[in-house]
Amino acid sequence: MFETLDEIQTKTEELRQRVAAARIAQGQPPEPPENFVPIPLGIILAEQLAPFYKIAVQYAAVVAAGTLTRVDTSKLEKYRETAKLASMCVGFHSGLIANTVEWCLREMDEVNTAIDEGRESEIDVASLTRKFSFFLSFMDDSPWADTYDHKSTRPHHIREAEIKAEVERLKNDPEAYQAELDAAWRHYHEIEHLI
């Protein structure tokens, strides 16, 4: 039998309260900070993460074949760093792409640790394959979907054109891009302990 909307809302509120209590117990505020990276910058950051998709697909294929392989994730740090900031994008899709990259890298780190400690048998390869399959579909999403805002009363094509123009401006003006990137990183480091 399906749950009613009221039952789902009640369970959702209970879960929200449990998460808030856990955050408070860890010395954090009940809610994480609001996402702050503007959509144009988020799109650029998500596009910088795009090459990681191929790496993750290849890794997933190796795992699906039943092989656990150690990967030098230190060579993938640029993706981890970019994903940290992109995960704070106010756009849903850019943030989702970034969160997926972070998840993949955490899984690779866990497999590396298991291999280093001789605990490969503890890794459920079938489960890991399913997870990668699920999350890779998110990573292949387009950050440009963030140009759509169902809450906005402005026509989509106008909003999309403005965001596209700002993305192009930032891509074509390295100083402006660097200034916006530096400001975003400064803010990230100010709130990082609250995330």
Image (spheres, rainbow, N blue to C red):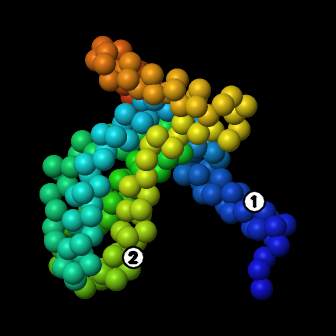
Snapshot quadrant of residue 82: top left
Q: Are marks 1 and 2 in contact (CB under 8 Å)?
A: no
Residue drawn at x 16%, y 49% as measured from the top left: 75
Snapshot quadrant of residue 43: top left
Task: Work out whether 79 lies above or below 69.
Answer: above
Location of residue 164 in the rendering, given as x and y in whole percent from the top left corner: 45, 28
Residue drawn at x 31%, y 19% as measured from the top left: 172
Task: Work out whether 78 lies above or below 127.
Answer: above
Location of residue 130 in the rendering, given as x and y in whole percent from the top left corner: 39, 76
Location of residue 52 in the rendering, given as x and y in whole percent from the top left corner: 26, 52
Q: Horizontal placement of 93 versus 175: left or right?
A: right
- Viewer-closest of 44 and 195: 44
- Viewer-closest of 151 and 72: 151
Location of residue 51 in the rendering, given as x and y in whole percent from the top left corner: 25, 48
Callout 1 environment at 10 Å: few (<14), some (14 to 19), or many (20+)? few
Would you say residue 9 is visible in this rendering?
Answer: yes
Task: Work out whether 192 lies above or below 70.
Answer: above
Residue drawn at x 38%, y 80% as measured from the top left: 127
What amino acid does circle 2 point to? Arg
Callout 2 environment at 10 Å: few (<14), some (14 to 19), or many (20+)? few
Front of the two marks 1 and 2: 2
What amino acid does circle 1 point to? Glu
The residue labelled by disc 2 is 130
Q: Horizontal placement of 5 versus 122: left or right?
A: right
Q: Horizontal placement of 182 versus 55: left or right?
A: right
Disc 1 and disc 2: Cα gap in Å? Answer: 29 Å
Q: Give the secondary structure at mark 1.
A: helix
Snapshot quadrant of residue 122: bottom left
The residue labelled by disc 1 is 13
